[in-house]
Image: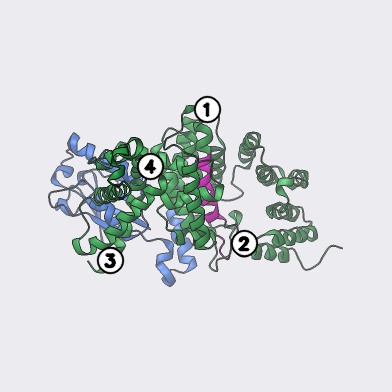
């Protein structure tokens, strides 16, 4: 193997092993920052040794053994001879655990560790941005520059976020465990939120020159699939994965040949990814079977499934979508859901009813500055033939939108309403 | 990137003999590991070729040849579809699969729309995908 081929192979091993490695080490040393350092040391050792020695048969076990040896060396260096008698409690225990062979041998243990790590990196003690950065780094196996590029911030900013996040987890003594029954629902919803946030930033970038960033969607999908395999009985875990798979099935139909956004109504449905649609519909069925009352992600997946099953906008089951949004609105009370509901009402029962709903949201503080409010209103006005007003709404929406591609689309829609301003 | 892993047949698979409990257990473990790493998108086993057929094309003539077919090792007995970040990752996963006895497993990257480049005009592309959609709905 050429040196560059070996490096690519080592990168692949890292992608496969890093989350399990860091999770297993965190269990032993009980500090996620130390665990990540040890894992990185082992990775560096692999980069040094494997081009010469070849990739070992069990690369994961090699990395774990190397990381543990580094851990033992580091601890021994810290504990000088004089202090050896005081080597008690936690340090001694850690040293013993590092010294035990085959700790990572039992697959079930390792998988439990990965789940514990997910709950740790998505812990509510961290800010939203910190959770996202730390989860992508420790569970997604992304490098700091990759995360920085994905979220259009500097590497320094991401590096700082990650360092602070690890420190916060240490200071707050966040335990390395899957939360108990009493707080599971709340903690799980924090985990799902992180994954969906990553997905959404890929699906409809909030800023920048690109409308979608498929790599981020793939990272989120992978995290969602891992979580669904680790918690197969949790309805909302299945619901979120179903939602993401169905939405991702539209990714390649969502941009035109020049990178311009293509909205759902205008998409060539033949371009949807039918393997993902099928997986999404299967996942939704699983979520529905496991649920009592459907949770917010499962409800959104059910909406997405209505679109996925329809051959065209006209054939879409809009009344069912309205009913699903009714349930979702009752559950979340979110004005954004109400806005989506207004779109569905327009399609199901006509633009007059839709406009009434949109106008009732005009003073909603949570929607102030949200570009989709005037954008939806413009859409409804077009259907009513009130083009001059629609044009103003699209222009207003474009002024509020931070994504370059989406802004261009909104301006084009404004122009399409005709050259004449209001009479 | 999507990959298809083609698992070849064997005299046993052609005879419809089920793998041993031990072999099944190892394969289940491997499949679980693929799933828990977010790699596996699909995977199925195929019935022996005695339940399949071939159609031979010669000019306008079509000849149906019923299974079973010989050369078991050239026949496909099952497949996986994986989502990986790179060819290297797919190879790394395949190396971990519980096979032995000199069997060779083929790994192929699945074409995605962007791989066709200029050859596939938007019209051809749309026609292609419409066909695939119809196939999926049938």
Residue visible at 55% across and 43% down in the picture: A306
* Magenta residues, dominant SS class: helix
Nearest to the eye among marks 1 and 3: give it: 3
Residue visible at 34% across and 44% down in the picture: A25
Q: Give the camera-side residue of A203 and A42.
A: A42
Give the alpha-carbon distance from disc 1 to disc 2, as whole Å.
39 Å
> Which of pointers 4 and 2 lies earlier in the amino acid sequence?
4
Give the alpha-carbon distance from disc 4 to disc 2, as whole Å.
35 Å
For the residues beneath circles 4 and 3, the answer to whether they share a chain is: yes
Give the alpha-carbon distance from disc 4 to disc 1, as whole Å.
28 Å
B115 versus A104 height, above or below: below
Nearest to the eye among marks 1 and 2: give it: 2
Q: Magenta residues, as a range? A: A190-212
Residue where numbered disc 2 is placed: A403
Quadrant of image for the C terminus of chain A: bottom right
For the residues beneath circles 1 and 2, the answer to whether they share a chain is: yes
Which chain is blue in the picture?
B
Q: Secondary structure at mark 4?
A: helix
Residue A55 circle label: none
Q: Chain of mark 4?
A: A
Q: Chain of mark 1?
A: A
Give the alpha-carbon distance from disc 1 to disc 3, as whole Å.
51 Å
Q: Position of residue A333 (x, y in %)?
A: 67, 37
- Residues at discs 4 and 3 in contact (Cβ within 8 Å): no
Chain A display color: green
In the drawing, does residue A295 fall left or right of residue A372? left
Residue A5 circle label: 3
Q: Chain of mark 2?
A: A
Assess whether residue A209 is covered by the magenta stretch. yes
Residue where numbered disc 1 is placed: A292
């Amino acid at each position: 193997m050429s040196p560059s081929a070996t490096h690519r192979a080592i990168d692949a091993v890292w992608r496969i092993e890093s989350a399990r490695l860091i999770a297993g080490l965190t269990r032993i040393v009980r500090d996620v920052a130390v665990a990540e350092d040890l894992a990185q040391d082992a990775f560096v050792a692999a980069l040094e040794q494997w081009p010469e020695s070849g990739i070992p048969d069990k690369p994961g076990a090699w990395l774990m053994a190397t990381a543990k040896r580094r851990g033992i060396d580091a601890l021994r260096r810290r504990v000088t001879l004089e202090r050896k008698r005081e080597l008690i409690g936690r340090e001694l225990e850690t040293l013993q655990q590092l010294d035990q062979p085959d700790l990572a041998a039992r697959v079930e243990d390792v998988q439990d560790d990965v789940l514990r790590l997910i709950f740790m990196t998505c812990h509510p003690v961290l800010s939203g941005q910190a959770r996202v950065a730390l989860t992508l780094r420790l569970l997604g196996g992304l490098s700091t520059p990759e995360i920085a590029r994905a979220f259009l911030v500097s590497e320094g900013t991401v590096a700082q976020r990650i360092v602070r996040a690890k420190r916060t987890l240490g200071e707050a003594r966040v335990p390395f465990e899957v939360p108990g029954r009493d707080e599971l629902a709340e903690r799980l919803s924090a985990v799902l939120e992180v994954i969906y946030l990553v997905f959404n930033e890929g699906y409809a970038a909030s800023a920048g020159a690109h409308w979608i960033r498929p790599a981020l969607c793939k990272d989120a999908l992978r995290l969602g699939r891992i979580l669904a395999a680790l918690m197969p009985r949790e309805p909302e875990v299945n619901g979120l994965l179903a939602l993401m798979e169905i939405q991702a099935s539209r990714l390649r139909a969502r941009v035109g040949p020049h990178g311009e956004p293509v909205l759902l109504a205008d998409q060539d449905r033949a371009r949807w990814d039918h393997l993902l649609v099928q997986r999404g519909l299967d996942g939704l069925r699983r979520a529905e079977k496991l649920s009592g009352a459907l949770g917010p992600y499962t409800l959104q997946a059910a909406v997405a499934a209505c679109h996925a099953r329809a051959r065209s906008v006209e054939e879409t089951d809009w009344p069912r979508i309205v009913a699903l949004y009714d349930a979702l609105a009752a559950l979340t009370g979110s004005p954004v859901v109400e806005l989506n509901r207004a779109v569905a009402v327009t399609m199901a029962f006509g633009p007059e009813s839709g406009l009434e709903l949109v106008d009732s949201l005009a003073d909603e503080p949570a929607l102030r500055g949200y570009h989709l409010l005037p954008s939806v209103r413009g859409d409804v006005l077009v259907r009513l033939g009130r083009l001059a007003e629609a044009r103003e709404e699209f222009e207003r929406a474009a002024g509020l939108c931070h994504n370059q591609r989406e802004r261009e689309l909104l301006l084009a829609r404004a122009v399409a309403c005709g050259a004449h301003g209001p009479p | 990137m999507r990959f298809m892993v083609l698992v070849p047949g064997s005299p046993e698979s052609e005879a419809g003999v089920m793998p041993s409990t031990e072999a099944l257990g190892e394969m289940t473990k491997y499949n679980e590991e693929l799933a828990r790493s977010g790699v596996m998108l699909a995977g199925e086993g195929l019935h022996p070729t005695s339940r399949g057929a071939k159609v031979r094309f010669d000019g306008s003539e079509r000849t149906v040849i019923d299974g079973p077919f010989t050369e078991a090792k050239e026949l496909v007995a099952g497949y996986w579809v994986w989502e990986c970040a790179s060819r290297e990752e797919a190879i790394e996963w395949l190396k971990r699969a519980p096979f032995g006895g000199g069997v060779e497993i083929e790994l192929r990257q699945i074409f995605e729309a962007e791989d066709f480049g200029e050859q596939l005009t938007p019209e051809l592309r749309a026609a292609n995908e419409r066909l695939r959609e119809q196939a999926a709905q049938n």
